[in-house]
Amino acid sequence: MGAEDKLVAPSGFDGPVRNRKITDPLCLLLLFASWVAMTYVGIYAMNKGNIYDLLQQKDYKGRLCGTDEDENGKVLPEFLAIVDLGLNRKCVASCPSVTDKEILICKDQATIANLWGCPQNSPPHASDYDLLVMCGACFYSLDSIEIVKYCTPKNGPVVRDLIKTLVDKYKPATSANTT
């Protein structure tokens, strides 16, 4: 391949410059409309939004940890630990450093009182711990590390095994269907 093999335009070809036109006016209109819509969303967010909703975590009651106050008027702690099987969170002073089925992180008493099937003992008896977890009032202490104010369990399989063991313990026995 050398200079003699260079590309040669076909006869009558004058290049694309003379016949150019907008080929996608609908696409251009949609792009402009999206710019207008996103500009509106940005202005609305700046005027009416709350940046703390993005930066600070909320507990199971929708309260901002480290900012909002509890029922007694005290500012909530800033870390979030798992508080129920739904993996909802509760504001805590520090992340748990041990996995232990005998240490529970629980919702407040008023919330527990309104949960169906929960033992109402205060403080709970050790025999009630599994029931408190099953009814959604509490969760076991899980050895965690803090990641952006979230107490993140260090060992996922342990969490899975705790939940599986608990569910297997309380699920109704199924009988074989013999017909």
Image (cartoon, helix red, strand yellow):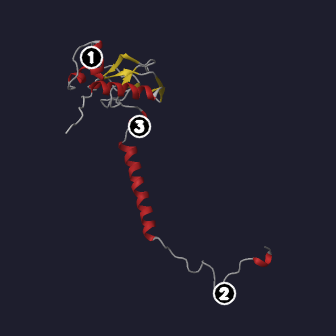
Q: CA distance from mark 2 to mark 3?
A: 63 Å
Q: On the image, numbered disc 1 is attached to which residue? A: 128
In terms of secondary structure, where does tag 3 sit? helix
Classify residue 69 as left or right of residue 152: left
In terms of secondary structure, where does tag 2 sit? loop
On the image, the x and y values in percent for residue 175 come to 23, 32
Q: Please tell me the numbered disc located at residue 92.
A: none
Circles 2 and 3 in contact, beta carbons < 8 Å: no
Whether residue 58 is situated above or below residue 35 in the rendered picture: above
Q: Nearer the viewer, residue 155 or 149?
A: 155
Q: Amino acid type of disc 2?
A: Ser
On the image, the x and y values in percent for residue 152 come to 45, 28
Residue at 79% across / 76% down in the picture?
3
Q: Earlier in the sequence, mark 2 or mark 3?
A: 2
- Nearer the viewer's eye, disc 1 or disc 2? 1
Residue at 21% across / 17% down in the picture?
120
Residue at 39% across / 56% down in the picture?
37
Q: On the image, numbered disc 3 is attached to which residue? A: 54
Q: Amino acid type of disc 3?
A: Leu
Q: On the image, numbered disc 2 is attached to which residue? A: 11
Q: Earlier in the sequence, mark 3 or mark 1?
A: 3
On the image, the x and y values in percent for residue 20 come to 55, 77
